[in-house]
Image (spheres, rainbow, N blue to C red):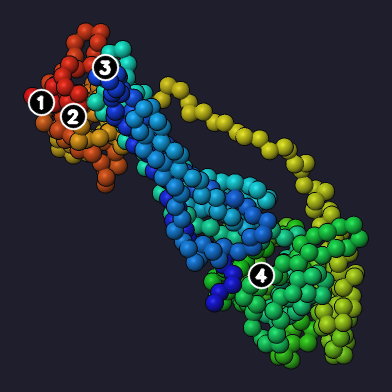
Amino acid sequence: MAEFADHVTVSVKAGDGGHGCASVHREKFKPLGGPDGGNGGRGGDVILEVGASTATLLDFHRRPVRKAGNGRAGEGSNKSGAQGGDLVISVPNGTVVKSSEGEILADLVGTGTRFVAAAGGRGGLGNAALASARRKAPGFALKGEPGEHRELVLELKTVADIGLVGFPNAGKSSLIAAMSAARPKIADYPFTTLVPNLGVVEAGDIQFVVADVPGLIPGASQGRGLGHDFLRHVERCAALVHVLDLAPLDDDRDPVADLDTIEAELAAYEAATGAPLAARPRLVALNKIDVPAARELAGRVRERLAARGLPAYEVSAATTEGLRELKFAMAAVVAGARAAEPEAEPARVVIRPVPAGGPDFEVTRAGEGVFLVRGEKPERWVRQTDFGNDEAVGYLADRLARLGVEEALAEAGAVPGDEVLIGDPGDAVVFDWDPTVPMPAGPKSRGGHTPGPRGTDRRLRS
């Protein structure tokens, strides 16, 4: 069974808002006590939060569909419905949230960082909230809005200061085990580790995180092997350490050629993704010098690397020889990178109000005798309307008329009998436009009051 996942697709559904209640207060000697229908509760949000104890996206792999609680419907006696419970899901530090189209929505770094992946729907107003001086006893209420439904892609990019890169079986996992308290699975076989391993290393008063980046083989940047999946884990590292195997199972291997191969894969990945890997400082660990032949080879390799300006350290994960020098060299690079970082500013909430004066809707011709109305307000009002209640439909007509939809349709060339679609063309509500159905004349028309039994609208019975 898999124990690690760093790339998953998840479906999140926020809670629907509760419907408003249409109710009239009744008690002895008060047959018409007025509307007292309460509002529906708001649906719960789906929230992603960085958890200190979460290290993998495996739980999403097992349960890819998540849903928050729905809001409760309003009740009589002015009782508002309860709000739906938020669903807070823990994700690892370094999780990148993308839309299904690949747009980056959030980069979650730092324990406690939150992102609302799907917002809950607003609850519908009850008839008590819809009452006015001109509509004293509405016979309808507004429906709750559906919560957001999103398909998201979550990618984990390991948050580490140092990334260990190298061919399979070069000893990267063994080095992490020797330098830290991490205990990755280690075996003597020429295959790659399947899980990025993290270890906390201390050198003097500096503490930093080291990550083993597995899966790097020739062609990894083009998707060969597991490298394409794991290369993303080097993006956040302050420095890269090449771990070269000086005692490979294949005697014909050249350690410097291995380094060149890995650098070529990193360069190809940078070209494909734009990740600034070329600017990362490099160190080289010449591993397995406990083997006599490897110790002899280390001197020659070190000279070749020095000619390139690459600092090399002879180490042995088996005997811990040379690890102290390597650790302090890593710590120096990390300290320099941290000192170069801009000073962190206190967290603040950024409010970006929608610019005023923009159009509330847009009318376009969608075909012969067909017109499409798009806009946040008309689409939301349609979702809130109970089309089984004539008075509610009349209230919608009043709102659309006050917004200017009828005038815009006339200017666009609509004639009586044309089809009017409101919303997404694939899931729109369709009306037969009849501008001859008048709104009530006089100042009372602003309130949309139309005399008649509760729940009816005489304009709709022509």
Mark nearest the camera among 2 and 4 is: 2
Residue at figure coordinates x 56%, y 46% from the top left:
115
Tell me: residue 113, above or below residue 197: above
Q: Of circles 3 and 2, which is in front?
A: 3
Residue at (40%, 31%) from the top-left corner?
A: 79
> Which residue was labeled with disc 2?
390
x, y percent for residue 327 = 86, 67
Q: Which residue is mark 1?
A: 461
Q: Earlier in the sequence, mark 4 or mark 1?
A: 4
The answer to whether mark 2 and mark 1 are in CB contact below 8 A is yes
Residue 377, can we see it? no
The percent coordinates of residue 59 (x first, y second) are 54, 64
Say whether residue 225 is visible: yes
Q: Nearer the viewer, residue 457 or 182?
A: 457
Using the numbered discs, state the Cα–Cα distance from disc 4 to disc 3 in whole angstroms: 75 Å
What is the x, y in percent for residue 439? 19, 17
Which mark sits nearer the N-terminus, 4 or 3?
A: 3
Marks 4/1: CA–CA distance: 69 Å
Q: Secondary structure at mark 1?
A: helix
